[in-house]
């Protein structure tokens, strides 16, 4: 007579329980390819976004380089840098998530 597997009490326990008892029944989980991680930073804090909308105004064909004003040009540079910060934060959180899923054996 088969016995029921022990029911887990933690998040990681539930994922291991699923993998051990049900993953074989889902074809998409069979033969999956491993994730390759070349970005090494892992961060479990998903920060508030820092980028904001850039003020739009008609461009000019004179100084400063076609922007409506020097402050608009500066604002665009600042927001591009903020977008980079946001992307690095998201990459760190995603990397930590992949690490965690690999650690519990849900992905390889």
Image: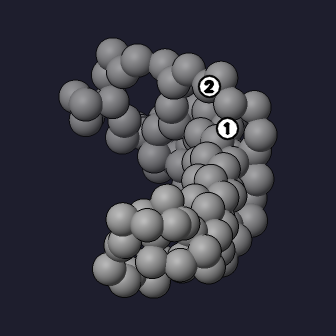
Cα distance between the residues tagged 2 and 1: 9 Å
Between disc 2 and disc 1, the foreground one is 2
Frontmost residue, 24 versus 95: 95
Q: Residue furthest left?
A: 27
Frontmost residue, 36 versus 104: 36
Q: Quarter of the image holding residue 55?
A: bottom left
Q: Quarter of the image holding residue 64?
A: bottom right
Sort mark 1 into few (<14), some (14-19) or many (20+) by Cα contacts within 10 Å.
some
Mark 2 sits on what residue? Answer: 37
Tell me residue 40's x, y (percent). Answer: 75, 31
Q: Are marks 2 and 1 in contact (CB under 8 Å)?
A: yes
Q: Residue furthest front?
A: 62
| Quadrant housing the C terminus | top right
| Quadrant housing the N terminus | top left
On the question of residue 79 being in view, the answer is: no
Say left or right for 11 vs 3.
Answer: right
Q: Name the mark on residue 99.
A: 1
Q: Name the mark on residue 1.
A: none
| Mark with earlier residue (2, 1) | 2
């Amino acid at each position: 007579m088969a016995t029921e597997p022990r029911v887990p009490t933690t998040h990681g326990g539930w994922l291991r329980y699923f993998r051990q008892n049900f993953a074989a029944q889902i074809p998409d989980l069979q033969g999956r390819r491993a994730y390759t991680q070349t970005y090494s930073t892992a961060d479990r804090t998903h920060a508030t976004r820092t980028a904001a909308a850039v003020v739009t105004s008609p461009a000019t064909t004179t100084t400063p380089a076609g922007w409506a004003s020097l402050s608009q040009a500066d604002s665009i540079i600042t927001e591009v840098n903020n977008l980079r910060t946001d992307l690095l934060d998201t990459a760190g959180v995603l990397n930590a998530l992949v690490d965690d899923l690999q650690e519990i054996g849900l992905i390889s």
